[in-house]
Amino acid sequence: MKMMKFSWLTMLALGLLTFSSCEKEDDHDHDHGHNEITINILEPGPDEVLADASDAHIHIEIEATDSNHDIDIVLHPDGNVDDKILDVHLHEHDQKVVFEQDLDLSSYPAGTKFHLEVEACSDHDCEEKVFADVEFSIQ
């Protein structure tokens, strides 16, 4: 009978320890304060005209005061949001996320305008979003 009481008390103690450690982790996740996100579209620049459409370089940096979460990057020609040249979803928890890619846009006619759009979530539930975009064209 003493052995049964000991086992039951041991199980109860272990259960309470497990529960309290989860509580501490959950509290820790929510104590970070407000996470500020900064989106820097470094290339192409706003209203830039790319001389070589076959070598369009995309360079984006997303910086967070705490950590990044979900990031969406979309590139499409002006007036056609269904023609997604880039449709990238990143789930990163780094403080700084760098995205670079070279694209061949030479299949589009000279003078075509493009929209590069970046949306980043400042929290894991994506209740707050930050948005940045640039328009550029090709010769």
Image (spheres, rainbow, N blue to C red):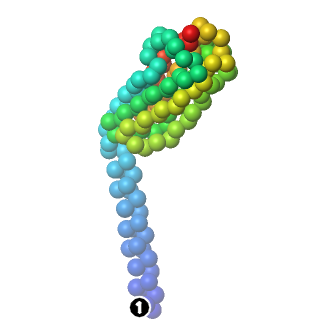
Q: Quadrant of residue 2?
A: bottom left
- Which residue does the image show at 46% across and 39% down from the upper left? 69
Q: Quadrant of residue 36?
A: top left
| Above or below, comparing residue 99 to residue 57 in the picture | below
Q: Is residue 35 at all visible to an observer of this figure? A: no
| Above or below, comparing residue 55 to residue 62 in the picture | above
Q: Is residue 93 at all visible to an observer of this figure? A: yes
Q: Which image quarter is the C terminus in?
A: top right
Disc 1 target residue: 2
- Which residue does the image show at 42% across and 37% down from the upper left? 97
Camera-side residue of 74 and 121: 74
Q: Which image quarter is the N terminus in?
A: bottom left
- Which residue does the image show at 57% across and 15% down from the upper left? 114
Camera-side residue of 137 and 95: 137
Q: Which percent across, then down, holds residue 10?
A: 40, 79
Left or right, 86 with reference to 50: right
Q: Residues within 10 Å of mark 1 (few under 14, many from 20)?
A: few
Secondary structure of the residue carrying tag 1 is: helix
Q: Which percent across, then down, holds residue 91?
A: 50, 41
| Above or below, comparing residue 62 to residue 11 in the picture | above
- Amino acid on which disc 1 is placed: Lys
